[in-house]
Amino acid sequence: MRKILIVEDTQAIREELFDIFTLEGYLVFEAENGKKGLKIALKENPNLIISDIRMPEMNGFEMFKKLKKNDKTKAIPLIFLSAKGEKEDIKTGMNHETQDYLTKPINVKDLLNAVEKKIQKKLIIDEK
Amino acid sequence: MEIKLLKETLKKERKEQKEARHVLEKKNIDLLQLIDKISLENESLIIANRELTSKNAENLKQAATLAFAKKELIFKDELTSYQLKMEQLALDLTRLIETTNAPIFGIDDNGLVNEWNKSSEKITGFKKHEVIGKKFIKNYITKEFQKAVKKVLDQALIGKETANYEFPIYNKNGARNMILLNSTSRRDKKGNIIGVLGVGQDITQIDKLRTTLEDSAFRLKLVMESLSEVIWGRSLPDCALQYVSSSVVSLFGFPVADWYTNMHLWSDMIHPDDIKRVNKENEVLFNSGTCEMEFRILTANKEIKYINSKVLIIKRTDGTPFFMTGISRDITEQKKDKEQLKYLNNTLIKKSNKLQISNSKLKEDITEIHELRTASESIAKELIQFIDTANAPIFGIDNKGLVNEWNQTSEKITGFTKDEVLGKDLVQTYITKDYQAVVKKVLDDALLGKETANYEFPLFAKDGTRVMVLLNSSARRDVNGKITGVLGVGQDITQIDTLRTASESIAKELRQFIETANTPIFGIDNKGLVNEWNQTSEKITGFTKAEVLGKDLVQNYITKKHQEAVKNILDDALIGKETTNYEYLLYTKDRARVMVLLNTTTRRDYKSNIIGVLAVGQNITELATYRNELELQVKQRTLKLNDALEEQKNLTELKSQFISSTSHEFRTPLAAINFAAGFLRKYWAKMEPIMVKQKLKRIEVQVLQMTKLLDDVLIIGKAEKTKNNKKSPPLNLGDFIHEIIDEVDDSFERSHEIVLIDILELKNSTIFIDKKLGRSIFINILNNAIKFSPNAKKIIIELSSEKSYTVVSVTDFGIGIPKAELKNIFNPFTRAENVYLINGTGLGLSIVKKTLNIIGGKVTVNSRIGHGTTFIIKIPKI
């Protein structure tokens, strides 16, 4: 069973994402900020992380940097799910591909597509 | 048969056996008998052997005894001869002891005398027979030495011998004899100590001699010490000090001990100027063996003393010097007396020389005086001639003021002849009334020796006209230098005086003009001190002329800021560079400042030397004030304009920021709605009805959240709009607050008790605020108070009053606000870290702040994390 970690401070969004990925057959973990997200990622080694950016305690950007520094978590694929505006800031700052960012509000279909693509890509890399 | 046969055979056999045994037994007995016999024989043999052996031993013994006896015989012979020799030796020794002239005595190991030779008898007077067997120490040694002598003898008795021990012995008459003792242990044949033999030496005479010597040495020392001269001795060739008398202390100032330890002390003390000479004298000393020298020393107190020192070198018989002795004495006093005498003698000679010289000088002087007198007489004659004919008026008065000189020019100027004038009182008769007192003073001064130069002096002429004379007066003295009168040398300045009077009147007019001019005019001298100050200057500054004259203009009357510039202008004027239209500030008496427009003119004396600066001003204070005010106004307006511009800029920025944040805040509920809707569309077929209901409910909640956000945004928009519309209708504070409390109670279903404290009875007072805006302020604050204190039961609203504000404070007992967040809480969409579980738009407090800003009110906050928060809202009274 594939594991997915949702890092999101807004409870409503978190609950919706939980429902969607549970029905899609994932084992879903939830964290309400970057700090907790980092802890769960280390413990559960999920196949994918979906993270908000603006959060209390530790924002998504900081969490991402910490994940990349740790050998255990640096290969975990991550998708930012953020409101518009934040995305522009982070993109210029981090020089990442557009597909790593999803903008709120997004369709369930588009979300699931992006997640599936990301996981496939990771699998191909692993096989190589 | 067979058995019978068998039996018989057996019987036969038994018989044979029996017989054989018999034979054997018999043989055995024979053997035993044989053994006995042999051992008997053996025994007798052993006994015989023993006897033989003992006999043999006896024989051997006898042989040994024989040999021994033989040896003994030989030994005894040798011994006898040895003994004989020894006895002879002992006899010789005894005789030697008896006859030697050294006292020899012996004691046994009990301390009893057992030897006492002739010499001992002679010295002590005790005969041998008297002494033998007596206790030696107890009877013949003086009490005080008994212990020590006993020790010496006891030591000898255990084999330790003592050499040259001195002790006294009594003789028969009780006189004491001094003995120098060497003790020897006396041993018997086997080497056991059996007594002591003492060999003495009578040193009674030596001892006496020594005592006498010590005595005389002591006496010599006493004599030496009582002398004021220093007597000293040094051994040679090491030059070490052997003795020095204690007077060395008083003479040189160093303690005696220093002299023994410091060999160079003596040479160190010699006056540096005398060292060479003393060294030379020392050479003489070592050549001739004696010398006497005089030199100076520096004592320990740095005092100079004159010393006379006689030194003698003592030589051994072979001519080598081994001792040096000397006597040194203080001759400072004698030396001083000598010097004094020498000095007195010298002065006397000098005095007599001087007398001779002055005598001859006197003679010369007398001649000179004669010559001088002749010369001065001729000069006097010439002078009188000169006075008479000089073209300057010359006149003289005696010490009573009566005229005694009147030359021809005086006659010409005044018209009075010498004859008329002589003997008349000058002041009374020829001086105009108004000058009499002054002239008299000048002349009286001259009579006291104080001379006056260039004094203007008015005389009457014979025709009644006034003659102006410029006078130099000098005292006239007799030969003794006593003042006898005054000689006046004049100059007729009547013409000059007239001219001057005219120019003075012009000056007066000018001065009048300066004084009364309606512009401020003032002058300084070349030191910068004020010397002109006209009436207008007085009027403007408030300082009177009297106050200002002589003061430093720049230091006292110019504002600090302008001092340097004004000084530069005045300095320029003082070197001839004039300045026009310079503006500067003067102080008035009441420290107000006056703006003056200044033109400077250099002031010169009649020889055109620069003597100061004249400044003509114009009071432009009012003008300047007006101008300054204008400038200030322009500045203020510009500032205001800039502020407004800045504010506009900030506002625009804020607005765009607000729009961007708002759009962001709308995205979150929209995302939630979108997810829920998408979920329904995708999975509706497999969803339970309750799950569908839950999703729909979530959509509704999110729509509500969005509506609230929209309302808040609209309120902010409205607040902006009312900015220019300042007039707000009056509201009753009590009614207004109660209305809001009711509304909040309804929406939170009375979760908290809201307490209103109104000590000052302010509920009937009026506030001026738009009702809708007011509501948005207090509803937001109260909502927050309840939302952020989920575990508390109470909210307190307190009304109070300040000078220009009505104050409403709202206190909750909730989670509080982290310190780091306090400064941001009034910014839009700011939510503290500890509230992300509590719903909110993040706009509430920014609405409160904005609204209060618009009506001129204030909001402040106090908070402690975990204890609660108080918001203080101040609404302006008008």
Image: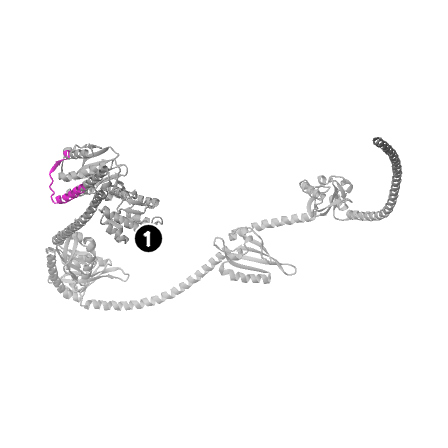
Which element is circle 1 on? helix
Residue located 25% across and 67% down the image:
B380
Instruction: Please say whether residue B719 is one of the residues in the magenta stretch.
Output: yes
Q: Quadrant of the C terminus of chain B?
A: top left
Spot occupied by residue B631 in the image (x, y as percentages of width and height) = 14, 53
Sort mark 1 into few (<14), some (14-19) or many (20+) by Cα contacts within 10 Å: few
Q: Residue furthest front?
A: B1
Residue B858 in the image: state x and y as whole percent. 19, 41
Residue that mark 1 sits on: A125
Q: Position of residue B518 (x, y in %)?
A: 10, 55
Lateral position of residue B643 relative to residue B92, left or right: left
Picture residue at 83% right of the left edge, 31% below the top = B3
Q: Would you identify the image quadrant in which residue B870 lies?
A: top left
Q: Magenta residues, as a range?
A: B707-735
Image quadrant where residue B281 sits? bottom right
Q: Give the overall secondary structure of the magenta segment.
A: helix
Q: Residue B24, percent across and down? A: 87, 35
Image quadrant containing the N terminus of chain B? top right
Nearest the eye: B744 or B18? B18
Indicate yes or no whether the magenta region holds residue B809. Answer: no
